[in-house]
């Protein structure tokens, strides 16, 4: 596995109208990292992911290393599931847009264990777990070396969730991928991530999970009352170990 | 039906049917049926002006169609404005302005169309435009599918959505424009929508959907012409075609969804 920085974010600011979602955020991702982005609802996790993908306007600097190829698995797809689109149609459409060989469809389908039956099924008729697998296969088309996941298991039950995370881990090892994953699930973060980025209104932390995810940091990030106290004091974004003092 | 002008007209109408089926399939999936009706109706003020001032109705209709297309494109982009309301206003306003402008004796023609013999030049121009439409749909099929499925994933794949949406709307209007003379402003959108609805009933994959919609459209126009020529002897062909098309849709309901 090659090492070195694959992504560098400096002084990132994202605003929607007058509402600031991300303020002065800086972090680095190295090749082969598994970065988990955590934080409460509305903290800007999805927004950050979309900015990293170049889908949103932002200020500051987002720099991918020249060889980075991004694959994206969104949280949910608002598609009309009644559309007469089969899983294979979808993969074939992306393959054609990227001018890939049609064999690449079979390759990605095999990588995520999509059976021929699922491939020829209409997107409206497959289970949520299969649908999520199809989205991962879709992301794998074009041989990305970075995969960005936005809560890939939000709509799944625990068993299906477990399978998806096993799949992500296997893919990461087999294909030497860098993974950036938005997640609610702290057990996943401890299990898979080697770096964690916490986002919330009042604090940002970044580092190995066991160092930054202290109980105090988690409480500061997720519990509403302390958030308001912190806000009134007008604190700057801080390291997690300092949060305890203000709790 | 013997002279070449009539044959040209019928062939062009049949080719138009195929284009309408293809474009309609995507319009249906994009859920822009309302926009489809508006685009055909914004031709009315232009048609009215053309009849009033005696210039080519296609030119008048074409200009207001183009303006209407740009308007809808802008409305789609600016989601903060309620698109439905704005479209509703444009729709009703266009019909009213068209009704005021159009001289009484040209009313039926403007609203319901008129089948006429066409020159070789018009024929080939029409064939060229239809070829352009079919080329667009086949060339951009994959990008359109991705955009339908998820604009976000399409953008992440590198598709320029704004340009794609504008191109689609322009192709859409061009389709309406070709149908305008013989279908009339009120029903020009119908041949884009109804056969697509029929096709949707019969298909569960994109390619079958496109094929079924085009065939349903082709059948409606073909049967419509035959009925009008040998049975009904109507002044305008459009209502006959639309009724046949609606009947075909009715038939498709018998079959359970694929």
Image: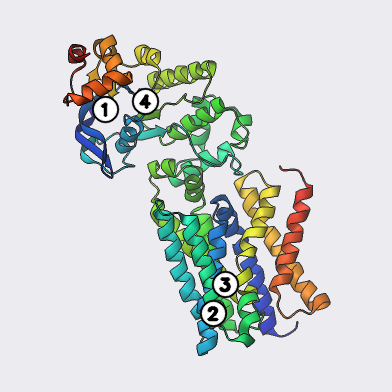
**C-alpha separation, residue under disc 4 versus residue under disc 3:** 50 Å
Q: Which residue has dot 1 on it?
A: A201
The answer to which of A82 and B111 lies nearer the viewer is B111
State which chain disc 3 sits on: B
Q: Position of residue A239 (x, y in %)?
A: 18, 18
Q: Secondary structure at mark 4?
A: strand
Discs 3 and 2 lie in a common subunit = yes
Q: Secondary structure at mark 2?
A: helix
Assess whether mark 2 and mark 4 are in contact (beta carbons under 8 angstroms): no
Assess whether mark 2 and mark 3 are in contact (beta carbons under 8 angstroms): no
State which chain disc 1 sits on: A
In this image, B41 relative to A247: left or right? right
- Looking at the image, is mark 4 or mark 1 earlier in the sequence? 4
How dense is the environment of label 3, judged by Cα within 10 Å: few (below 14), some, or many (20 and up)?
many
Residue B167 lies in quadrant: bottom left
Q: Residue at x 39, y 15 (%)?
A: A188
Q: Which residue has dot 4 on it?
A: A182
Q: Which residue has dot 3 on it?
A: B178
Q: Is residue A54 above or below residue A129?
A: below
Q: Secondary structure at mark 3?
A: helix
């Amino acid at each position: 596995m090659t090492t070195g920085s694959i992504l560098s974010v400096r002084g990132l600011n994202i605003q929607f109208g007058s509402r600031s979602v991300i303020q002065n955020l800086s972090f680095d991702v190295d090749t082969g990292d598994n970065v988990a982005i955590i934080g409460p609802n509305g903290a800007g996790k999805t927004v950050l992911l979309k900015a990293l993908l170049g889908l949103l306007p932002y200020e500051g600097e987002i720099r991918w290393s020249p060889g980075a190829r991004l694959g994206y698995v969104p949280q949910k797809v608002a598609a009309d599931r009644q559309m007469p689109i089969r899983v294979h149609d979808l993969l074939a459409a992306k393959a054609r847009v990227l001018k890939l060989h049609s064999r690449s469809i079979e390759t990605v389908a095999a990588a995520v264990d999509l059976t021929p039956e699922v491939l020829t099924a209409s997107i409206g008729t497959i289970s949520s777990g299969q649908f999520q697998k199809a989205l991962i296969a879709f992301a794998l088309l074009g041989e990305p070396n970075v995969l960005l996941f936005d809560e890939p298991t939000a709509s799944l039950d625990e068993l299906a969730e477990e399978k998806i995370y096993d799949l992500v881990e296997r893919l990461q090892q087999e294909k030497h991928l860098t993974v950036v994953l938005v997640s609610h699930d702290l057990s996943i973060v401890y299990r898979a991530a080697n770096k964690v980025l916490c986002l919330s209104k009042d604090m940002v932390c970044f580092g190995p999970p066991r160092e930054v995810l202290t109980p105090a940091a988690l409480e500061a990030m997720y519990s509403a009352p302390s958030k308001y106290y912190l806000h009134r004091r007008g604190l700057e974004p801080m390291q997690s170990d300092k949060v305890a003092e203000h709790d | 039906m013997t002279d070449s002008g009539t044959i040209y007209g019928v062939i062009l109408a049949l080719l138009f049917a195929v284009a309408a089926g293809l474009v309609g399939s995507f319009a249906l999936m994009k859920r822009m049926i309302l926009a489809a009706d508006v685009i055909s109706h914004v031709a009315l003020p232009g048609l009215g002006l053309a009849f009033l001032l005696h210039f080519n109705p296609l030119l008048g209709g074409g200009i207001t169609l183009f303006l209407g297309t740009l308007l809808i494109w802008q409305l789609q982009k600016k989601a903060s404005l309620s698109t439905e309301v704005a479209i509703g206003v444009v729709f009703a306003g266009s019909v009213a302005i068209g009704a005021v402008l159009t001289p009484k004796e040209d009313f039926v023609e403007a609203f319901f169309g008129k089948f006429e013999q066409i020159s070789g030049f018009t024929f080939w121009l029409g064939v060229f435009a239809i070829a352009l439409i079919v080329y667009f749909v086949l060339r951009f099929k994959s990008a359109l599918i991705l955009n339908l499925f998820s604009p976000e994933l399409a953008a992440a794949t590198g598709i320029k959505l704004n340009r794609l949406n504008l191109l689609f709307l322009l192709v859409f209007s061009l389709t309406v424009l070709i149908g305008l003379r013989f279908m009339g402003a009120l029903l020009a959108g119908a041949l884009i929508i109804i056969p697509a609805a029929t096709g949707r009933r019969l298909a569960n994959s994109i390619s079958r959907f496109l094929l079924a919609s085009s065939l349903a459209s082709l059948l409606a126009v073909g049967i419509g012409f035959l009925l009008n020529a040998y049975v009904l002897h109507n002044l305008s062909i459009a209502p006959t075609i639309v009724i046949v098309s609606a009947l075909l849709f009715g038939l498709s309901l018998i079959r359970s969804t694929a």
